[in-house]
């Protein structure tokens, strides 16, 4: 019970620190913006006065050696926020962290009521607390996959618009009008940024941060080359469309060839839990020792750890990089 209380207090303190860091980031951005506006509108100063101001500037938190500086350097909150944007979930990071803490506490309470073991309860709470992160990852992968499937058709439409004599911005407008989200919404953001004065290559770079697809990176590089060299963009986009379709066809072939192995790994990972549940219903005395006897509890913990390790190893083996 002491372990559960200590773990809960530690989790609350960590999340509170992270929330404070997040709010501090917002205040620092506002101060940086105000400072930039002040420097733009102020009268130029003498060199001596400027050097004094530079010497009196505070050191940034990420330049320190403490815990907060380490969190800044790891950029964990920024990565979580980027994953939420890529998943199309526009919530605050503090709200996600609060949900995770509440689920963690509920999992510990449920585990304590069912098993009465501190380690099992903490493991259940930690597993349930990861569910929001898994949901964000699922939404992110699904959205990126939908974007990748729409990309070849969008490239074909851009090529047709350019061959018809339209400009690239006009081709993007046609694309936004014809395609739904996610590709329509992302290119709509690009057009809005371009209307506000941002260069088109820079706007495409910003979209690449929101949609980290390798196929989209090829389009961004092609637009940058065209803006610098001035070559014809329509043949480049047509060739790029063929390359994207070839990569997607290769990916589908790889998934078809590894489907049996992936299914075998899933069956091997889920089978022990199914067998344990079946014995608990058919013959409860066989499975009762795993939950009541101290040696049986240790065996059950070791089996869960080994099963999760096997699933992770199988997943890593079947991952193909091309």
Image (cartoon, rainbow, N blue to C red):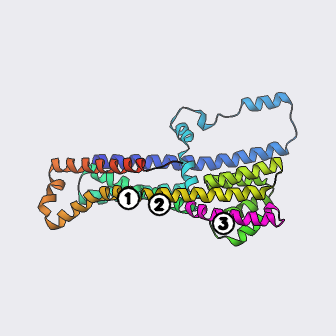
Q: Which residue is mark 1?
A: 260
The Cα–Cα distance between marks 1 and 3, rounded to whole angstroms, is: 31 Å
Q: Which residue is mark 2?
A: 135
Residue 133's disc is none
- Tell me whether the residue at label 1 lies in contact with that at label 3, contact meaning CB atoms closer than 8 angstroms: no
Q: Residue at x 63, y 50 (%)?
A: 26
Foreground disc of the pair 1, 3: 1
The Cα–Cα distance between marks 2 and 3, rounded to whole angstroms, is: 28 Å
Query: Element type at marker 2?
Result: helix
Q: Residue at x 64, y 55 (%)?
A: 243
Judge by depth and name the residue closer to the eye, 309 or 46. Answer: 309
Question: What is the x, y in percent for residue 236?
Answer: 74, 55
Q: Is residue 98 visible?
A: no
Q: Is residue 51 above or below residue 15?
A: above
Q: Is residue 2 above or below residue 194?
A: above
Question: What is the x, y in percent for residue 204?
Answer: 71, 54
Query: In the displayed structure, does residue 119 sit left or right of residue 148?
Result: left
Magenta part of the protein: which range? 144-170
The Cα–Cα distance between marks 2 and 1, rounded to whole angstroms, is: 25 Å
**What count of labels does the image hold?**
3
Q: Is residue 317 visible?
A: yes
Query: In the displayed structure, does residue 100 sit left or right of residue 49?
Result: left
Judge whether residue 192 is colored magenta.
no
The mark that comes first in sequence, 1 or 3, is 3
Residue at the left extreme of this rendering: 285
The mark that comes first in sequence, 2 or 1, is 2
Residue 153's disc is 3
Query: In the displayed structure, does residue 298 sit left or right of residue 148?
Result: left
């Amino acid at each position: 019970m002491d372990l559960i209380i200590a773990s809960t207090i530690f989790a609350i303190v960590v999340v509170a620190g992270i929330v404070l860091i997040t709010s501090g980031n917002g205040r620092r951005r506002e101060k940086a913006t105000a400072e930039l506006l002040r420097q733009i509108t102020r009268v130029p100063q003498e060199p001596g006065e400027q050097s004094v101001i530079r010497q009196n500037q505070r050191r940034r938190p990420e330049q320190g050696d403490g815990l907060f500086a380490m969190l800044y350097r790891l950029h964990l909150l920024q990565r979580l926020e980027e994953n939420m944007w890529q998943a199309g979930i526009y919530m605050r990071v503090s709200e996600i962290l609060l949900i995770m803490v509440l689920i963690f506490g509920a999992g510990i309470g449920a585990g304590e009521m069912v098993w009465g073991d501190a380690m099992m309860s903490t493991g259940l709470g930690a597993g349930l607390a990861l569910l929001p992160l898994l949901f964000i990852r699922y939404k992110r992968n699904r959205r990126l996959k939908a974007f990748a499937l729409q990309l070849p058709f969008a490239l074909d439409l851009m090529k047709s618009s350019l061959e018809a004599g339209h400009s690239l911005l006009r081709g993007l407008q046609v694309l936004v009008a014809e395609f739904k989200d996610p590709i329509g919404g992302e290119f709509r953001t690009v057009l809005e940024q371009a209307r506000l004065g941002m260069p088109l290559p820079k706007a495409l770079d910003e979209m690449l941060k929101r949609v980290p697809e390798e196929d989209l990176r090829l389009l961004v590089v092609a637009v940058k080359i065209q803006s610098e060299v001035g070559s014809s963009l329509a043949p480049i986009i047509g060739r790029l469309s063929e390359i994207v379709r070839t990569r997607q066809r290769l990916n589908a072939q790889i998934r078809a060839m590894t489907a049996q192995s992936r299914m075998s790994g899933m069956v091997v990972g889920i089978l022990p839990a199914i067998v344990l549940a079946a014995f608990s219903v058919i013959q409860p005395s066989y499975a009762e020792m795993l939950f009541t006897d101290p040696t049986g509890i240790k065996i059950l913990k070791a089996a869960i750890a080994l099963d999760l390790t096997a699933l992770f190893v199988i997943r890593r083996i079947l991952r193909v990089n091309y």
